[in-house]
Image: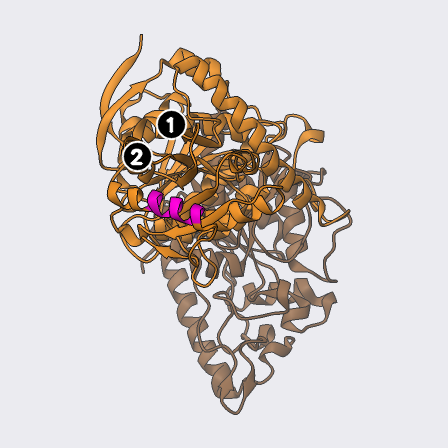
Chain colours: A brown, B orange
């Protein structure tokens, strides 16, 4: 498990190139900055189609949309064959890639325990192309392909809990993180960096444009997701050992998270209650797992 | 010392990978390519190739992406597939060629509408920008895989090479194959040293830094790619000549291989294994006093334009045999030969035969008929409408 990182331990070096080309208040740009500060220069960054968050100073390569897992596999195997295991293969992918079109390939790479670190900047839809539904979209969220009307209440499905899918494959390390908890995020990247095998860090990165909230509030939105239990911060090792990193005495109501976002504004009280119940149940699961120090579901 | 072994085509392919000291191989098994992946697994298990990485991955598309990235990092990479597997690979194949990754892929022909062989699988990939070579026997598989790396890795080309050979008749049929000594192959094919790679030792030399190709002329990458594909002709000829000198095995110019074309009135063409049956037919035709030569097309992409413009000068007709057909458009080599001769000042009759689709057997008798028909077309100065079904 990662160890607490203090502000003094945050590297001063930047791993990304300024300026970026993101929208104002982009959560993914923050995630890129924090991640590549810790990764250092000796990495090969992999991308698949996604928002152009922040380019890295390290060599970068892009693959086809469904190529997340295989491109990391190709790189890490080649590094091994050439005796250059000092270089790390890192993927920085969006939720559309990780939860949707590249999901299968990542599962296969995870099962082979390829030596690669996958970082997902999760903004809960295909934001690069204007906000279409992905496997990372939460239930009831309105996207451009889950429109709200007399026949539709937005997205019909619950967000894929990808961490547990990867856990089922027993990979060495999985973590969730949030841009509102930068020390926690960087500590997890620092810890995952040097583990051998397949590692996954899922970072929730609010998108002011797609979620429709004030770009000044990115951190507040991200924080309320964690504080309401909608985006719990945890780590899973070897598919079993479990640790919850943030445990408030009492969860904030999910309305604190939902209300500032116009993608949820059509939700009725019944629908909000349904989501609240769902969130509470999931929260109890992770609390139980944390108590048992292993996955219990 | 020269080593011989009786082996199937797929084993010849795997042996070539070993001789070429492939670093990373990734593949998904598909009939009739399957046993290559098994031989590669055996090679890995044997420990005979230190540092060799073999990935039996979850599908053909991932296999293509894996070798693409391995080559970007600087590894010598190999993959193999067949028919529908090749079609599943189609999407990332363009990235491999566009990224100028000189790996080699064996395509064990399987039709796109049938389990049985024809050339529709590789022919359907013309737009992906690879070099396409077609071979006839197991020895030629082994030789061409090794030569494929030398051709693709040449600074003038820097493109991936697909080596196509017919499924079943070649993949699963055993014949004696000469295994060249490792020291000789090592001298012929030094380790792959890409001019640029994803390894960051020299920051200025790293590729993909920052935003990549976002500025300048968008046509530029295509212009360079086209140049590489055209340069391949010259490089193929050089590499085949060098290999012939080393091994004594000569495959014509590398682009085409001619058989009894000297003094012929007409020629017929063939690609892949059926060229063997065609050669037997040529012997019979000459015995009967019919002067018919054979041109085996070895490189389809780049197309042997210069060779056909030269051959056309000495014959009255060319009977083209295609083992694939684009419905409504015709046979690919027929169209290319006609296209090539438009730029020439000699215009022999060009007859377009199509057969052997979805594994239909093509016999020596078929090629005898094809030769005789081509002679008739030469006399009549006109051919029947394309396609002429065999």
Residue A84 magenta = no
Residue at far top of view: B1
Instruction: Please rate how many residues cluster around mark 2, counting C-alpha atoms within 10 Å: few if below 14, some from 14 to 19, many from 20.
Output: some
Left or right of residue A14, residue A244 in this image: left
**Residue B109 at x, y percent in the picture:** 34, 45
Give me the residue at 63% from left, 43% from top.
Answer: A36
Residue A218's disc is none
SS assignment for the magenta stretch, majority = helix
Left or right: where does residue B198 sit relative to residue B382? right
Residue under label 2 = B276
Nearer the camera: disc 2 or disc 1: 2
> Is residue A92 visible in the rendered structure shown here?
yes
Q: Residue shown at 48%/50% (left/top)? A: B381
Assess whether residue B378 is covered by the magenta stretch: yes
Decide which of B331, A116 is in the foreground and name it: B331
The residue positioned 42% from the left and 49% from the top of the image is B377
Pinpoint residue B197: horizontal percent, then vertical percent. Answer: 60, 31
Residue at the bottom extreme?
A150
| Residue B17 marker | 1
Q: Start and end of the magenta stretch?
A: B370-379
């Amino acid at each position: 498990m990662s160890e607490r990182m203090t502000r003094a331990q945050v590297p001063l070096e930047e791993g990304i190139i300024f300026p970026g080309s993101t929208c104002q208040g982009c959560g993914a740009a923050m995630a890129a900055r924090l991640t590549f500060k810790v990764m250092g220069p000796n990495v090969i960054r992999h991308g698949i189609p996604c928002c152009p968050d922040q380019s890295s100073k390290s060599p970068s390569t892009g693959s086809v949309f469904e190529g997340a897992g295989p491109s990391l596999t190709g790189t890490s195997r080649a590094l091994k064959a050439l005796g250059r295991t000092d270089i790390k293969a890192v993927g920085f992918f969006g939720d559309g890639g990780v939860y949707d079109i590249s999901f299968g390939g990542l599962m296969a790479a995870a099962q082979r325990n390829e030596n690669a670190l996958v970082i997902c900047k999760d903004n809960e839809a295909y934001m690069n192309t204007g906000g279409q539904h992905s496997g990372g979209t939460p239930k009831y969220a309105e996207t451009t392909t889950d429109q709200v009307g007399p026949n539709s209440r937005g997205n019909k499905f619950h967000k894929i809990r990808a961490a547990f899918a990867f856990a089922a494959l027993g990979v060495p390390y999985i973590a969730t993180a949030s841009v509102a908890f930068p020390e926690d995020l960087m500590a997890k990247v620092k810890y995952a960096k040097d583990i051998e095998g397949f590692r996954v860090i899922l970072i929730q990165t609010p998108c002011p444009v797609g979620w429709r909230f004030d770009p000044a509030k990115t951190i507040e939105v991200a924080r309320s997701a964690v504080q309401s239990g909608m985006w719990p911060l945890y780590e899973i090792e070897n598919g079993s050992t479990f640790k919850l990193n943030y445990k408030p005495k009492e969860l904030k109501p999910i309305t604190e998270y939902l209300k500032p976002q116009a993608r949820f504004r059509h939700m009725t009280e019944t629908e909000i209650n349904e989501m609240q119940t769902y969130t509470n149940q999931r929260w109890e699961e992770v609390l139980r797992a944390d108590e048992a120090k292993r996955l219990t579901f | 010392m020269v080593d011989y072994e009786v082996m199937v085509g797929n084993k010849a392919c795997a042996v070539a990978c070993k001789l070429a000291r492939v670093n990373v191989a990734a593949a998904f098994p598909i009939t009739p390519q399957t046993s290559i992946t098994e031989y590669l697994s055996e090679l890995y298990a044997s420990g005979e190739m230190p540092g060799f990485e073999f990935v039996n991955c979850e599908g053909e598309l991932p296999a293509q992406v894996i070798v693409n990235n391995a080559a970007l990092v600087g590894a010598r990479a190999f993959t193999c597939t067949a028919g529908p597997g090749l079609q599943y690979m189609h999407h990332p194949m363009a990235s491999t060629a566009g990224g100028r990754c000189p790996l080699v892929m064996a395509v064990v022909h399987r039709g796109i509408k049938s389990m049985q062989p024809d050339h529709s699988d590789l022919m359907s990939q013309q737009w992906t920008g690879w070099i396409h070579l077609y071979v006839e026997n197991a020895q030629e598989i082994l030789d061409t895989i090794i030569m494929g790396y030398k051709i693709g890795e040449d600074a003038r080309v820097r493109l991936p090479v697909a080596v196509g050979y017919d499924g079943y008749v070649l993949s699963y049929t055993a014949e004696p194959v000469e295994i060249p000594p490792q020291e000789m192959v090592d001298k012929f094919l030094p380790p792959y040293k890409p001019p640029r790679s994803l390894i960051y030792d020299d920051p200025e030399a790293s590729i993909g830094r920052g935003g990549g190709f976002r500025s300048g002329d968008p046509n530029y990458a295509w212009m360079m790619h086209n140049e590489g594909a055209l340069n391949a002709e010259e490089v193929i000829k050089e590499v085949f000549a060098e290999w012939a000198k080393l091994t004594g095995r000569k495959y014509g110019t590398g682009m085409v291989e001619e058989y009894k074309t000297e003094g012929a009135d007409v020629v017929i063409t063939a690609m892949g294994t059926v060229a063997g049956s065609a050669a037997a037919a040529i012997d019979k035709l000459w015995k009967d006093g019919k002067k018919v030569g054979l041109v085996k097309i070895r490189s389809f992409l780049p197309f042997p334009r210069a060779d056909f413009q030269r051959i056309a000068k000495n014959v009255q007709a060319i009977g083209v045999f295609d083992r694939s057909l684009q419905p409504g458009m015709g046979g690919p080599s027929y169209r290319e030969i006609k296209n090539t001769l438009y730029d020439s000042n000699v215009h022999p009759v060009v007859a377009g035969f199509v057969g052997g689709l979805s594994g239909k057997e093509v016999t020596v008798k078929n090629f005898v008929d094809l030769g005789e028909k081509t002679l008739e077309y030469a006399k009549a100065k006109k051919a029947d409408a394309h396609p002429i079904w065999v």
